[in-house]
C-alpha cells in the first residue's frame, strides 16, 4: 500500500518535516523497510522476565540450536550488553539498530532495559534504539523509553477480541494480580491499544507483530488490521505460528498446526487492504546479530580476538584518609593516581574534578552526567559506587572496583600488580605454546 503525502494549498506535494523524519527512521532499520537490508541489527538479551504467558512461547535462556523468538544462549547484564555491542560494532560496522526483544518482555524488566539503552546511547549516539514488547506495560514506561532515545517500537498484538485472546494467553500479570481467562485477555488488549495510541501520538515509529494461528485468529486478521490502521501504526508484520512439540510450547504439545504458505499469503493480502505489510521477517532470536537472514555466529565473534593484556594500567583511588580506600565514588572531589605495571608502582599527580554527586547520600537527582573526564583511567578503586555511573564507566572500558573497600591503598595496588604480572605470564606462555616466541 502506497501512502501519498498531503498536498499543500499551492498544489505541491513536498514531504512534511514529520514525514522526512519518519523516512529517516525507516531507512536504516531492516525490519521497517526492505531497503534497509544492507544494515545489521543486534538484539541484547537483558530481559528474562515476562508479564504474560503465550501458548506459543517457551522462553529458553541457554539454547543455541533453535532459531525463534524467546531463545538466547546467554543472558546479559546491561554492562555486558554494552560490551557486546561495542565488539559487534567493531566487527560489523553496518550495525545501525540495537534492539531489546527479550527473551521475556523488555518492559517487564524496565531497570535492565533502560540501563542498557541509556548506556548504548552514551557509546553511539547515531544508532537506532528499538524495543519489542507485548504492550502490557507500554503506557507506563513510554516516557522513560522516549527519554532513553527509543524511536522504533514493536508491539505484538494478536487480536482485539477477548474471546480469541483467552485461547492465546493463559494468564496476564497486571497490578500485582495474575489474571486468567477473558479478564486477562481483555486487560491485555485494552493496555495494548492504550500504549499503541500513546506511542504513535508521541512520534514513535510503531510496527505491530501478529502471530497467525490457524483456527484461532486467522479469521480475525482483517478486522485487526483495520483497527491498527485506524490507530496509525506504521507497518504490520503477520508471522506464522512456529509449532513444534520439541520446543515445549503449549500449542506445540497440543498439536496446534502451523499456517500453510497459502494461508499466510491470504492473511497478508487481507490485512494489506488496511495496513502496509512486512513480508521479510525472520522471526529472530532474542540475541540475534547481523543482517536479516545472515546472522553471525556470536560465539565465533566473541572468541575471534585473543585477550589483550595491558603492559600497565592507570588506577584512580577515591580516598578521604589518603591511606585507605574509604570513599564513595560519587563523593570524591579528587582521585589519587597511580600507574601500575608488573615491575613497578608509580604515583602520579592527583586528579581533581567536579564530584559526581551534589548533596544527598543517595546521590541521584543532581548527579553530574558526563564521566568522559575519566576515560583515561583503566581502574577506579572506591568503597562504593552507584549502578548508573558504574554502567557509564563500563561503557567507556573503565572498571570500577569496590572489592578493596576499606583496604590499605598500598596493599591494593600491590595486589593489582600481582594480577597484572600473572596475566602477562599466562599470555606469554600461551604465545610460546603456539610457537610465537623463541
Image: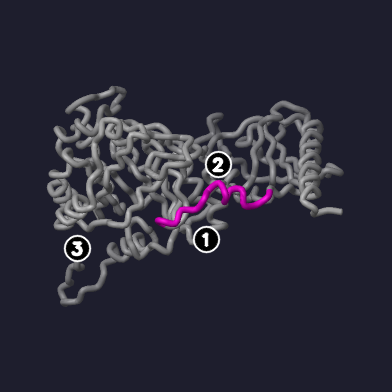
Q: Nearer the viewer, residue 118 or 193?
A: 193
Q: Within 10 Å of the Cα at label 3, are there few (<14), some (14-19), or many (20+) other Cα atoms?
A: few
Which numbered dot is residue 1?
A: 3
Q: Nearer the viewer, residue 198 or 296?
A: 296
Q: Nearer the viewer, residue 150 or 267?
A: 267
Name above or below for residue 339 compared with residue 322.
below
Tell me, yes or no, if residue 349 can be seen here: no
Which numbered dot is residue 93?
A: 1
Q: Within 10 Å of the Cα at label 2, are there few (<14), some (14-19), or many (20+) other Cα atoms?
A: some
Pointer 1 or 3: first along the chain:
3
Q: CA distance from mark 1 to mark 3?
A: 32 Å
The x and y percentages for residue 271 are: 17, 53
Q: Which residues are magenta?
A: 292-306
The x and y percentages for residue 345 are: 83, 42
- The magenta stretch spans residue 300: yes
Determine the image quadrant of residue 242. top left
Q: CA distance from mark 3 to mark 2?
A: 41 Å
Q: Within 10 Å of the Cα at label 1, are there few (<14), some (14-19), or many (20+) other Cα atoms?
A: few
SS at badge 2: helix
- The magenta stretch spans residue 14: no
Tell me, yes or no, if residue 59 can be seen here: yes
Which numbered dot is residue 80?
A: 2
Amino acid at each position: 500500500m502506497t501512502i501519498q503525502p498531503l498536498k499543500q494549498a499551492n498544489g505541491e506535494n513536498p514531504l512534511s518535516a514529520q514525514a522526512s523524519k519518519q523516512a529517516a527512521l525507516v531507512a536504516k532499520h531492516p525490519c521497517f523497510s526492505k531497503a534497509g537490508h544492507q544494515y545489521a541489527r543486534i538484539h541484547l538479551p537483558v530481559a528474562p522476565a515476562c508479564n504474560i504467558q503465550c501458548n506459543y512461547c517457551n522462553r529458553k535462556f541457554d539454547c543455541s540450536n533453535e532459531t525463534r523468538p524467546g531463545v538466547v544462549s546467554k543472558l546479559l547484564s546491561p554492562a555486558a550488553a554494552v560490551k557486546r555491542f561495542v565488539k559487534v560494532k567493531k566487527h560489523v560496522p553496518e550495525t545501525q539498530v540495537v534492539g531489546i526483544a527479550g527473551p521475556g518482555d523488555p518492559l517487564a524488566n524496565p531497570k535492565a532495559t533502560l540501563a542498557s539503552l541509556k548506556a548504548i546511547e552514551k557509546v553511539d549516539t547515531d544508532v537506532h534504539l528499538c524495543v519489542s514488547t507485548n504492550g502490557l506495560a507500554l503506557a507506563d514506561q513510554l516516557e522513560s523509553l522516549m527519554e532513553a532515545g527509543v524511536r522504533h517500537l514493536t508491539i505484538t498484538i494478536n487480536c482485539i477480541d477477548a474471546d480469541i485472546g483467552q485461547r492465546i494467553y493463559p494468564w496476564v500479570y497486571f497490578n500485582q494480580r495474575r489474571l486468567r481467562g477473558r479478564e486477562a485477555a481483555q486487560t491485555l488488549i485494552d493496555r495494548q491499544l492504550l500504549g499503541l495510541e500513546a506511542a504513535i501520538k508521541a512520534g514513535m515509529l510503531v510496527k505491530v507483530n501478529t502471530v497467525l494461528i490457524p483456527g484461532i485468529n486467522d479469521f480475525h486478521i482483517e478486522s485487526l488490521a483495520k483497527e491498527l490502521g485506524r490507530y496509525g501504526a506504521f507497518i504490520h508484520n503477520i508471522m506464522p505460528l512456529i509449532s513444534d512439540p520439541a520446543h515445549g510450547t503449549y500449542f506445540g504439545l497440543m498439536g496446534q498446526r502451523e499456517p500453510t504458505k497459502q494461508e499466510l499469503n491470504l492473511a497478508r493480502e487481507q490485512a494489506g487492504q488496511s495496513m502496509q505489510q512486512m513480508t521479510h521477517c525472520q522471526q529472530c532470536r532474542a540475541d540475534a546479530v547481523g543482517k536479516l537472514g545472515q546472522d553471525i555466529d556470536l560465539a565465533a565473534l566473541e572468541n575471534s580476538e585473543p585477550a589483550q593484556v595491558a603492559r600497565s594500567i592507570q588506577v584512580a583511588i577515591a580516598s578521604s584518609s589518603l591511606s585507605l580506600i574509604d570513599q564513595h565514588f560519587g563523593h570524591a572531589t579528587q582521585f589519587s593516581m597511580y600507574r601500575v605495571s608488573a615491575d613497578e608502582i608509580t604515583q602520579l599527580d592527583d586528579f581533581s574534578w567536579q564530584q559526581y554527586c551534589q548533596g544527598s547520600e543517595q546521590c541521584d537527582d543532581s548527579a553530574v552526567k558526563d564521566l568522559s573526564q575519566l576515560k583515561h583511567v583503566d581502574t577506579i578503586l572506591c568503597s562504593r559506587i552507584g549502578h548508573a555511573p558504574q554502567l557509564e564507566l563500563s561503557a567507556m572500558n573503565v572498571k570500577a572496583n569496590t572489592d578493596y573497600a576499606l583496604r590499605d591503598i598500598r596493599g591494593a595496588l600491590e595486589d593489582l600488580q600481582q594480577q597484572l604480572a600473572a596475566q602477562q605470564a599466562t599470555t606469554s606462555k600461551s604465545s610460546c605454546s603456539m610457537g610465537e616466541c623463541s
